[in-house]
Amino acid sequence: MEKFRLPRKLKKRLKKGLWLYPNDENGNSLMANPHRSKKDFQAYKKRVLENLISDANSRKRRMGYRRKMNKEVIVPDDELKKYVDDIFRKEVRRSSYETLLSAKNNSRAIIAYYNFINAYQLMQQGEVSYGNTCCMSVDHAKELLIKA
């Protein structure tokens, strides 16, 4: 196997990032090491890889994510109950539902309510990874309600 060498400064810069290939049809992405692998370095040169830690990329990604998750959507309480029953196990359904109802009526915590509704709707459209966001939004709502 032929040795793969890069200039020192380029290698240092490539080590600092968390490089990913584009998402596949399931939304999964492979990690790349362009400072170690010749194949990954070729993908980096063709601008196929994306640096997850880069300020510009992460800022764009965060803003797009926030726009998507903070969209104002209000659903009836019985529909919210169905959403909660679908996501959570029996032991935490009631407390989660009550937390979301309280968040819906609180000006500081309503953003967590919006996050839950939008994440659930995205999950129903086939983006399975938003299930964790639903759970985290309830935890976030609890924190915001304590502060209020």
Image: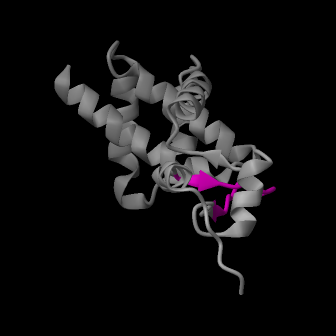
Q: Position of residue 34 (x, y in %)?
A: 63, 60
Q: Is residue 32 left or right of residue 81?
A: right
Q: Residue shown at 53%/34% (left/top)?
A: 58
Q: Is residue 122 left or right of residue 97?
A: right
Quadrant where the image shows the N terminus: bottom right
Front in this rendered view, residue 141 or 32: 32
Q: Residue furthest top?
A: 107
Q: Residue shown at 37%/43% (left/top)?
A: 96
Q: Position of residue 54 (x, y in %)?
A: 52, 38
Q: Residue furthest front?
A: 7
Is residue 24 shown in magenta?
yes
Q: Residue shown at 34%/12% (left/top)?
A: 107
Q: Residue furthest bottom?
A: 1
Quadrant where the image shows the C terminus: top left
Q: Position of residue 61 (x, y in %)?
A: 59, 32
User: Which quadrant of the figure has residue 41?
Assistant: bottom right
Front in this rendered view, residue 87 or 58: 58
Main SS, magenta residues: loop
Q: Is residue 91 left or right of residue 22?
A: left
Q: Is residue 85 left or right of residue 145?
A: right
Q: Residue furthest left?
A: 147
Q: Position of residue 146 (x, y in %)?
A: 18, 29
Front in this rendered view, residue 18 or 46: 46
Front in this rendered view, residue 30 or 90: 30
Q: Is residue 22 visible?
A: no
Residue range corresponding to the magenta coloring: 18-31
Q: How many marks?
A: 0
Is residue 136 shown in magenta?
no
Q: How is the image coloured?
A: one colour
Q: Residue shown at 36%/25% (left/top)?
A: 103
